[in-house]
Amino acid sequence: MTSKALMLRHVKAPIIAAPMFIVSTPELVVNQCRAGIIGSFPALNARNEKKESTLDDWLVKIKSRLNNEDIECPLYAVNQIVHKSNDRLMQDMETIVKHEVPIVITSLGAKEEINDAVHCYGGVVLHDVTNNKHAKKAYEKGADGLIAVAAGAGGHAGSLSPFALIQEIREWFDGPLALSGAISNGKSVAAAITMGADFAYIGSPFIATTDANASDDYKKMVIDSTSEDIVNTNMFTGIHGNYLGKSIENAGMKISDVIANKDSKNSSDVFSSNNDKPKPWSKIYGCGQGISNVKYVQDTVFMVNRMINEYNETISNLSPPTLNSDLANKILKAAEKAALDANWKVAICIVDPAGVPLCFTRLNGAFPASAELAKNKAKTAALFRKPTLDLENAVNGIRPALLAAGHTVLGGGEPIFIDEYCVGAIGVSGVLPTEDAEVALKGIAGI
């Protein structure tokens, strides 16, 4: 079965492209994978003018291109609407099993037989949920992973804050977890991961791409809209979803009337391939709130690469600084120079935050015992995040009990801070405590 670790190994950034009814195409999926994320599409998108399934043809085309072209991520997903109105469900499942689709995303219903069918060939099932109760039910029925659809997501959206939803699910679930809801750039991807999700689930920005099966009017409306233009209602499908307000007005309806009818359920078969009524997704456009940064129609690969670069830059900035070997040796050389300039025969040691030595030197003529003292001073400074001269003064004053802790409380150990993070320490021994500390501080000044 496809594990979380395997899924993450195959992507350049932890992003799953959300399947979008009508909009997602084989070309969009392939280019999402080409750029290094998991592409996806709804099975119901694969149909001809007679509304007959062409899923087999779509999968043959996608698999062929993923196998023969320069693709960063070989994983893709097919979305199945597990709802009684989907009269193609079992037919499409047979096709999915035949092609061994690596990831199946299930929505609007969880069935053990669907999950078992995917598991029989080693695939993984991710299930859409809008609350913790449905998440537990999906997991009990065999879903391997969950997609937390929070407030602000496009299409059928939840109403819960992503902070609350992720927190509640993570209290009991440690499997693959994606977060959906107004995520449209690398910074928001990083926020989702920091929050506890394994993947960001992104759909709406891909509407305004060259590969999307969306009208020019639809794409322009996405570009011209912001979160304030998104309307949440269950009027069109009986299930709450987010739509572009302008498309509702273009259909001859007042947004105030739509909002007033928020509890109506006037369509139960919108997913049926035999339904000839105008559907919300074709004239009334689904869209999430995170679209204000979509300024023009873009190439899919370009858009994904921008998200990946933003994500990597953000994660890099969020990661605490570390004391690498280059910096450690630079500090050591600066301290060594300071000691030589003063003609002080000392030992110098640089350690990491846990007190593990990174580099060491003992100048000619330094007393042998100074080697071990320098290491211990550095370790003490790193563990206490304080200069050992301060600890020595405390022992000589009102804190003699520090001696019982077994640490070296002699001046000459100095913590090393980068951007307010203690990344290690330097210890110097061989002359007076104040002189040892002077060498240590001049070493730190070297960076």
Image: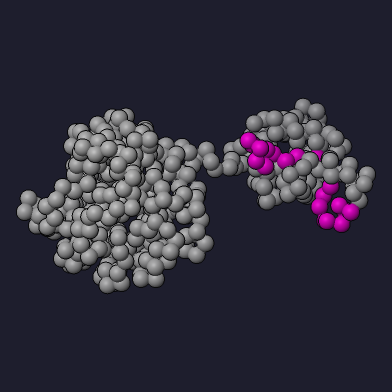
**As drawn, is 416 to the left or to the right of 372?**
left
Q: Residue at x 18, y 52 (%)?
A: 45
Is 183 located above or below residue 77 in the figure?
above
Residue at the top extreme, as displayed: 341
Q: Is residue 137 left or right of residue 100?
A: right
Quick check: is 117 in the magenta stretch?
no
- The image quadrant of residue 303 is top left
Residue 107 pos. (x, y %): 30, 59
User: Which quadrant holds the N terminus?
Assistant: bottom left
Q: Is residue 54 left or right of residue 155?
A: left
Q: Above or below — where is 154 with respect to 338?
A: below
- Is residue 331 visible from the viewing direction of this image? yes
Q: Is residue 284 left or right of residue 319?
A: left
Figure quadrant of residue 292: top left
> Which residue is at 23% across, 49% downward?
21
Residue 129 lies in quadrant? bottom left
Q: Which range is magenta?
A: 401-422
Q: Residue at x 82, y 49 (%)?
A: 408
Residue 380: x %, y % from top left: 77, 48
Q: Is residue 420 magenta?
A: yes
Q: Nearer the viewer, residue 228 or 414?
A: 228
- Residue under the image location 25 percent in, 63 percent down: 83
Residue 110's place in the image compared with 78, above or below, is below
As drawn, the residue found furthest toward the left would be 50
Tell me if I can see residue 204 in this picture. Answer: no
- Tell me residue 257's x, y (percent): 30, 42
- Residue 48: x and y in percent read 9, 52
**Outermost residue to the right:** 397
Which one is nearer the viewer's eye here, 66 or 200?
Answer: 200
